[in-house]
């Protein structure tokens, strides 16, 4: 038995992050979020020592598409301490193929790195020995270079059968008749599966590849696609000799297989449920946290791209869940596009958030690589035993309520249940079991309020502008509403007071108008998203104490004539799409009314 503990040798690898050209975090793994905490939620530069910041930026900006660079910089951890880190930087080629330039960065602790090297070399040596004892024939395909390798280990010696361009390999073995006629179509399927990076595959062929065509054998080529530490896709597999009486299916343990979902290889619904019930009732751990995850708009994905593509999305999401859960618990599939995590003894909300952030961002990024224009998001709800529930059944209902709230708030987010914020849990209805609104959250009907403003302010004039702003602010739980007008966008109206900046001329500078959608709306979930992108806007909004905002601009003859901002102070918010739609409508109505009254 190996005397090897993963944590002993993984301490040097802090984690991996993907950033955009403004150094903003697009995705990261759980270890990265946990180590750096909220400092990297938006801009990675917030963790870097000021003296090292320029060299970091210069290195990222000067990277060529096929280059890998290393740099030593000081980075601040979640304890506020600066440590020397080795950062490995490369361009994300998958996103580059979609016309988006992202940089992948792997962060390693320089102090632990040297200490870990010897231990890792010992582990590699042992695995080489085991592979040589098994006489394993290994194949490997590099998706970036198109290189295909077939090799084996004889303890200290590598035996290389093939090391060549994959397209040439196909031509070579077919032209030299190393594939039996009855296996040519199967070989073509194997070639296409490897080339396209299919998640998992297995093919049985009559081939003489390993004997240079001298002897035909029945062999199984099975493998899967993985993403290595640099974010590059690699196909790995084994070639096994098949006896004449052996089935082409891989032999497995039936009892073990009965616990697994056939597509994702996660626990199935029955097994993950029984596991959760056991953990809650065992008393072996202090707390059990469950997270229910749902792929947003999955029916649309299936209907638009087909069920095979949908299965690939499910498999990809499952691989993220398995990786980010790690040793903290287990993952299972409880429905078509629904999953559950069961996590033991989560230390605090910070640790839980780091896991959920990694799940959410990595599902989106990995699925975006599969086709142009597709954005796959997920919603998550969590609850903890015994803090939020006294039984597994109540725990599931509570997490399901949190999931429903995440869906209602606009999807693409996680909600950690809090009784004071979210209210008590209904014993009867849940989001997953009913698929409908299962909870009375006690909020006003916004559609009725918007209808009243349209009728009383925009049409009949019974409601004044300040009354309309007061109603909007209270209904949408805002802290400020500001209306800017004129050539320099001076502040003309404010609710509930005149605090904040006096003019919003920053909107007309630094290509800021490019942020506004076709509907003249710019949504700011957190003003830190502007850091490094719109310097003046970030400074002005920070100065005014604005943490999140929905901004609507009114144009006339192609020029900006006004802007209304719906703002939050002291808190951030993932704005629900329905709220954004309402604010866009209200902004247009307010300006049309002001222009109608001659207030230009």
Image (cartoon, helix red, strand yellow):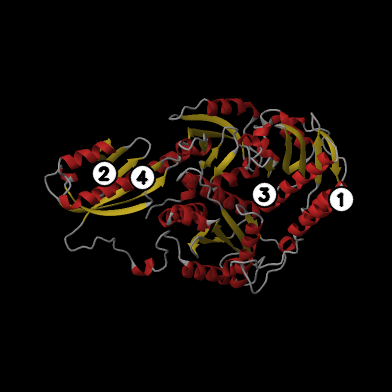
SS at mark 1 in the image = loop
Q: CA distance from mark 2 to mark 4?
A: 27 Å
Q: Is residue 283 above or below residue 515?
A: below
Q: Nearer the viewer, mark 2 or mark 4?
A: 4
SS at mark 3 in the image = loop
Q: CA distance from mark 2 to mark 3?
A: 52 Å
- 28 sits to left or right of 590: left
SS at mark 4 in the image = helix
Sequence-earlier tag: 3 or 4: 4
Sequence-earlier tag: 2 or 3: 2
Residue drawn at x 62%, y 64% as measured from the top left: 399
Sequence-earlier tag: 3 or 1: 1
Sequence-earlier tag: 1 or 2: 2
Instruction: List the residue tagged with mark 1.
Output: 461
Residue drawn at x 72%, y 51% as measured from the top left: 582
Q: Which is nearer the eye, 102 or 498?
A: 498
């Amino acid at each position: 038995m190996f005397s090897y503990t993963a944590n002993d040798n993984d301490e040097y690898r802090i984690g991996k992050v993907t950033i955009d050209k403004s150094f903003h975090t697009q995705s990261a793994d759980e270890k990265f979020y946990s180590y750096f905490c909220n400092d990297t939620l938006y801009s990675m530069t917030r963790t870097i020592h000021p003296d090292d910041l320029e060299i970091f930026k210069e290195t990222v900006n000067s990277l060529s598409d096929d280059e890998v660079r290393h740099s030593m910089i000081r980075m601040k951890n979640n304890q506020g301490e600066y440590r020397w880190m080795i950062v490995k930087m490369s361009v994300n080629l998958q996103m580059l193929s979609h016309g988006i330039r992202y940089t992948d960065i792997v962060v390693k602790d320089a102090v632990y790195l040297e200490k870990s090297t010897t231990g890792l070399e010992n582990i590699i040596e042992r695995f080489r020995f085991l592979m040589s004892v098994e006489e394993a024939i290994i194949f490997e395909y590099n998706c970036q270079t198109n290189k295909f390798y077939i090799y084996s280990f004889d303890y200290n010696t590598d035996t290389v059968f093939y090391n060549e361009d994959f397209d040439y390999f196909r031509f070579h073995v077919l032209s030299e008749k190393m594939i039996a006629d009855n296996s040519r179509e199967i070989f073509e399927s194997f070639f296409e599966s490897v080339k396209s990076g299919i998640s998992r595959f297995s093919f049985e062929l009559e081939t003489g590849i390993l004997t240079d065509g001298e002897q035909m054998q029945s062999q199984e080529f099975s493998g899967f696609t993985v993403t290595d530490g640099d974010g590059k896709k690699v196909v790995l597999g084994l070639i096994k000799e098949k006896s004449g009486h052996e089935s082409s299916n891989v032999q497995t343990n039936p009892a073990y297989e009965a616990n697994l979902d056939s597509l994702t290889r996660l626990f199935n619904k029955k097994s993950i449920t029984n596991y959760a019930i056991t953990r809650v009732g065992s008393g072996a751990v202090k707390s059990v946290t469950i997270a229910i995850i749902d792929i947003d708009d999955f029916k649309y994905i299936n209907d638009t791209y087909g069920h095979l593509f949908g299965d690939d999305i499910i498999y990809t999401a499952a691989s993220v869940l398995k990786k980010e859960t790690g040793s903290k618990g287990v993952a299972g599939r409880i429905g078509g596009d629904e999953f559950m995590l069961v996590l033991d003894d989560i230390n605090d909300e910070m640790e839980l958030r780091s896991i959920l952030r990694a799940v959410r961002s990595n599902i989106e990024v990995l699925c975006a690589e599969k086709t142009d224009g597709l954005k796959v998001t997920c919603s998550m709800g969590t609850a903890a035993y015994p803090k939020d529930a006294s039984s597994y059944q109540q725990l599931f209902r509570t997490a399901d309520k949190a999931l429903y709230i995440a869906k209602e708030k606009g999807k693409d987010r996680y909600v950690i249940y809090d009784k004071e914020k979210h209210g008590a849990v209904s014993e009867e209805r849940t989001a997953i079991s009913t698929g409908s609104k299962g909870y009375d959250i006690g909020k006003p009907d916004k559609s009725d309020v918007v209808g009243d403003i349209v009728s009383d302010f925009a049409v009949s004039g019974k409601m004044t502008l300040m009354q309309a702003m007061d109603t909007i602010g209270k209904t949408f739980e805002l802290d400020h509403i500001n209306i800017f007008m004129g050539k320099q966008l001076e502040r003309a109206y404010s609710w509930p007071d005149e605090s904040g900046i006096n003019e919003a001329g920053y909107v007309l500078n630094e290509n800021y108008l490019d942020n506004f959608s076709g509907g003249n709306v710019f949504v700011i979930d957190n003003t830190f998203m502007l850091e490094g992108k719109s310097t003046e806007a970030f400074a002005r909004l920070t100065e005014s104490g604005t943490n999140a905002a929905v901004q609507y601009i009114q144009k006339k003859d192609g020029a900006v004539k006004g802007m209304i901002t719906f703002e939050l102070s002291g808190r951030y918010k993932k704005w629900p799409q329905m709220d954004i739609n309402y604010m866009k409508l209200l902004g247009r109505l307010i300006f049309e009314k002001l222009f109608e009254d001659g207030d230009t």
